[in-house]
Amino acid sequence: MSLVSVDGVSKHFGTHVGVNDISFDLETGETAVVVGANGAGKSTLIRLLASLSRPTSGRLELDGTSLTDGNAAVRARLGVVTHATMLYDELTARENLRLHARLHGVDPKRCEQLLETVGLAERGGERVAGFSHGMSKRVSLARALVHDPDLLLFDEPYTGLDQTSLRRITSVLEGIDDRTVLVSTHDLARGFELADRLLFLNDGRLVGDLEARAVDDVEDVLEAYETRCRGRPGENQPADRTGIHR
Ligand SMILES: Nc1ncnc2c1ncn2[C@@H]1O[C@H](COP(=O)(O)OP(=O)(O)OP(=O)(O)O)[C@@H](O)[C@H]1O
């Protein structure tokens, strides 16, 4: 049985369609990257999988258990990084991680390891309120990993980062081999570097599902994307053709 199962999932917001009849499975250890232009439905999909939103129809399951029934045990197997950092600004980075560790019954030593991993060991005693966007995102990633989740969901990991944060976050994501990861991005080039699998979203529909291994280079991915999707993945973003910010 697959670890993640998404079956016929739609999400409507009044007359707007967030995602439209999406189905796919993810295996343990797989890293899937969801690519799409602005408004394609990437955040909607992540929020549905993160149990932050309920589908209008369809089923989302982790290991055979519904992600939409408010089951706390299954939600505890998720690590989530969204646009909202879910951090307490008035607490230090270390306190944020320790609070999360305590909630999950995790040894606080793991927080120190994770601060090191995200490159914030020396800043762990500082309040998150004073952190840059990239630093906050790194703390959010560390927080999402504290309890060693079976499924890490990360909405737009690469947006608004300086080179230091970009390198750290990329290296942490690349280092996750034994857990399932689902990342959303409009940055096709970086997504391709990370992915085992590329999922193309267009107007809420899943229009492409590619094994990244089977594709030679990013230009081929872009070509595959453009044959299936309206516009380009980085449309309306300050990016070049492949989505690499220069
Ligand atoms: N809370 C909401 N209320 C109304 N419409 C929404 C809401 N959330 C998403 N939508 C609509 O659903 C569609 C998909 O939005 P979503 O944010 O998932 O796209 P996205 O691919 O993440 O875009 P972006 O790259 O701009 O973040 C859009 O048409 C959007 O307007």
Image (cartoon, rainbow, N blue to C red):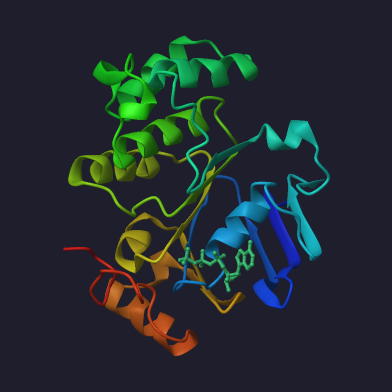
Residue 1 located left or right of residue 29 = right
In front of the other: 196 or 142? 142
On screen, residue 193 above or below 233: above
Which residue occupies 40% across, 65% down?
Answer: 213
Q: Residue at x 43, y 30 (%)?
A: 142
The structure residue drawn at horizontal position 21% and vertical position 46%, both measured from the top left corner, is 162
What's the residue at 24%, 43% (across, down)? 167
Q: How many marks?
A: 0
Ligand 1 location (quadrant):
bottom right
Q: Nearer the viewer, residue 157 or 237?
A: 237
Q: Quadrant of residue 220?
A: bottom left
- As drawn, 31 above or below 34: above
Q: Estimate the x, y position of residue 8 in percent, counting from the top left.
A: 76, 69
**Image quadrant for the C terminus?**
bottom left
**Residue 217 in sight from this viewpoint:** no
Q: Is residue 13 left or right of residue 211?
A: right
Residue lying farthest bottom? 227
Residue 178 rendering spot, x and y as whole percentages: 50, 38
Asked which quadrant contains residue 9, the reply is: bottom right
Res. 84 in view: yes
Query: 100 or 173: nearer the eye?
Result: 100
Q: Could you say where residue 232 lies in the image, as x and y percent from the top left? A: 37, 80
